[in-house]
Image (cartoon, rainbow, N blue to C red):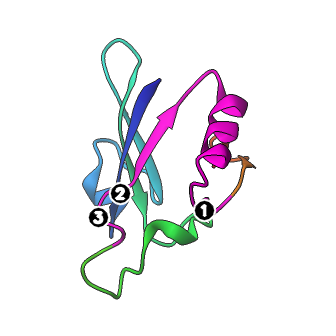
Amino acid sequence: MKPQTMIVVSDVEASSGHGGREYEQLIGADGTLLLQLHSWDAHEHPHMGDPGGRPYGNGVLLWFETEAFDAAVERAHAMSATIVDGPLVNPNARHREV
């Protein structure tokens, strides 16, 4: 499992090294994903929180990548974890998520 850190910001373009308007990935020298910057209202992620409310968001949004996605979803269901969205395919990121 690999962490995929994301920080939600009010201005992605001003916050990133080479400037995406709504979403940016900061990649390490070895090609690994180090950090994601994401605009509050982009790409239909309703659970990032309300930019008009404070404290912002849910505190921290953590994403993890795994080769065993289906098994992870099954474990979450078996533990009666609250799943607020998905499983679904995110066409922008080209992956499945929950």
Is residue 27 highlighted in magenta?
no
**Which residue has dot 2 on it?**
13
Say which residue appears at 62% left-offset and 42% top-offset: 93
Q: Which residues are magenta?
A: 57-85
Is residue 47 among what the camera can see? Answer: yes
Q: CA distance from mark 3 to mark 2?
A: 22 Å
Distance, label 3 to label 1, CA atoms, is 20 Å
- Left or right for 11, reference 77: left
Q: Amino acid at mark 1?
A: His
**Residue placed under numbered mark 1 in the picture:** 43
The numbered dot on residue 59 is: 3
Q: Residues within 10 Å of mark 3 (few under 14, many from 20)?
A: few
Closer to viewer: mark 1 or mark 2: 1
Q: Which mark is residue 95?
A: none
Please tell me in which quadrant of the rendered image residue 2 appears. Answer: top left
| 94 lies left or right of 9 | right
Whole-percent x, y for residue 37 in the image: 37, 51
Query: Vertically, is 98 above or below 49?
Result: above
Chain-order first, disc 3 or disc 2 = 2
